[in-house]
Amino acid sequence: MDLQEQFEQAVSNSKTLPEKPGNDVLLQLYSLYKQATEGDAGDDGPVNPFDFVAKAKHNAWSELKGQPKADAMQQYVDLVNSLR
């Protein structure tokens, strides 16, 4: 199974985890997914300064700037597998 297939399987598995992960892990999953599928986050954050969830998501994704998509995919796969 190649990395893309492993990633797609991990995305599917992430929806059926035995327990809901904590917010920190959810942010990590989100940021790795976005980096793996879209690449670097844009410089503009959320428009609403009081949308703290969107700001946290954008900040987490921005921290991965420059990381190759393949690395983010592998880290996502590893993280989901560790949660199962």
Image: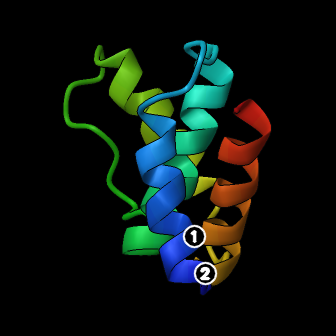
Task: Please report the residue visible at 50 percent of the width from the left and 43 percent of the height from the top.
Answer: 13
**What kind of residue is marked 2?**
Leu
Q: Looking at this view, is 10 or 21 the one in front?
A: 10
User: Is residue 40 among what the camera can see?
Assistant: no
Compared to residue 37, the image places residue 45 above or below, namely above
Image quarter (top left, top right, bottom left or bottom right) of the C terminus: top right
Horizontal relation, residue 13 to residue 74: left or right: left
Q: Is residue 40 above or below residue 11?
A: below
* Label 1 Cα crowd, 10 Å radius (few <14 / some 14-19 / many 20+): some
Residue 60 x/y as whole percent: 58, 42
Residue 81 visible in the shown view: yes
Q: Residues within 10 Å of mark 2 (few under 14, many from 20)?
A: few
Residue 6 is tagged as: 1
Residue picked out by circle 2: 3
Which quadrant does the N terminus fall into? bottom right
Compared across the picture, whether 16 is left or right of 67 comes to left
Helix, strand or loop under label 1? helix
Q: Quadrant of residue 45?
A: top left
Q: Which residue occupies the foreground of this view, 54 or 49?
A: 54
Which residue sits furthest bottom? 2
Residue at the image position 43 percent from the left and 58 percent from the top: 34
- SS for dot 2: helix
Label pair 1/2, CB-CB below 8 angstroms: yes
Residue 67 position within the rendered picture, expressed as x and y whole percent measured from the top left: 67, 75
